[in-house]
Amino acid sequence: MKAITVTQLNKKNFPNITIGAILEFSTIPATYYYNDLLFMDFQDHTEFHEDAGFLEVVSATITDEVNEKLGAIYLDSNVYRKDVVSKSPEEIEAINLQMAYAPIQAEFDMYQKRKADGVDAYLLQSAKLRLAKLSGQITEEGHSAIEELLRPVRDEVVNGQWINAKAKLEAIGSESVGIDFYTELHTELTTYINENY
């Protein structure tokens, strides 16, 4: 990491930056005015970097992420430094709240995923049933009966409640919906639960 202080001499390179500001770079810029010459490969001219003002950044080591942070960068002889400073009570409180909230957010995100996956799974099964009806594999009445029987399963799965959906499917049993369709649904629910809970 390198840094440079914006001065009147190098301001041409940083037209929108205030003089005195310190800028940090992970890599030296390729395009750079140096001694009134425009370089298109300045990063390769290491012999000019220090004279141009690009100096190393030395950062102290943070040992306590919760209570410490790196302070403002400053020039110290021929190197830029960042010291470890204490975080303010407000910063520490914000981190503690974020850490306390993280598990809730993670669980919420999983619910959102399970719900979205449930909607997709239901729509896919509905499409299969409709095609079975249209192709004559099941009757209109059979289609309506299966849809009605599976309504409790659907209501659970589209709300991301896959475990409840499986329990409701098992309560319905295979006799009413057919062993093949039941097995397909049961396998899909079981696989999803094993992979996502």
Image (cartoon, rainbow, N blue to C red):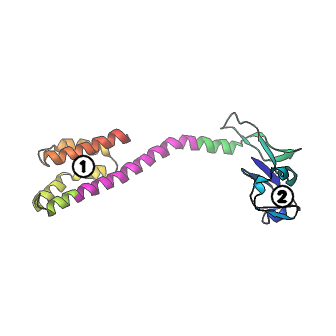
Which residue is denoted by mark 2 in the rendering?
Answer: 6
Q: Would residue 168 be visible to someone looking at this image?
A: no
Which quadrant would residue 123 be assigned to in this image?
bottom left
Q: Would residue 47 be visible to someone looking at this image?
A: yes
Secondary structure under the numbered disc 1 in the rendered image: helix
Give the quadrant of the C terminus. top left
Q: Please provide percent x and percent y for residue 105.
A: 49, 46
Q: In the rendered structure, does residue 115 fall within the stretch colored magenta?
A: yes
Q: Report the number of discs.
A: 2
Q: Please provide percent x and percent y for residue 102.
A: 52, 43
Left or right, residue 155 beside residue 136? right
Residue at 53% across, 43% down? 101
Inspect the image, locate mark 1, and give the three-letter code of the amino acid beneath it: Val
The stretch of residues the image draws in magenta is: 98-127
Which residue is denoted by mark 1 in the rendering?
Answer: 153
Q: Is residue 135 above or below residue 187?
A: below
Secondary structure under the numbered disc 2 in the rendered image: loop
The crowding category of the residue bearing disc 2, from other C-alpha atoms within 10 Å (few below 14, some 14 to 19, many at least 20), is many
Inspect the image, locate mark 2, and give the three-letter code of the amino acid beneath it: Val
Q: In the rendered structure, does residue 105 fall within the stretch colored magenta?
A: yes
Q: Is residue 39 above or below residue 157?
A: below
Q: Please provide percent x and percent y for residue 168.
A: 23, 44
Could you tell me how far apart the alpha carbons at marks 1 and 2 are, in whole angstroms?
65 Å
Q: Is residue 67 above or below residue 139?
A: above
- Dominant secondary structure of the residues highlighted in magenta in the image: helix
Residue at 18% across, 46% down? 182
Q: Residue lying furthest top in this view?
A: 63
In this view, the residue in front, 155 or 15, is: 15
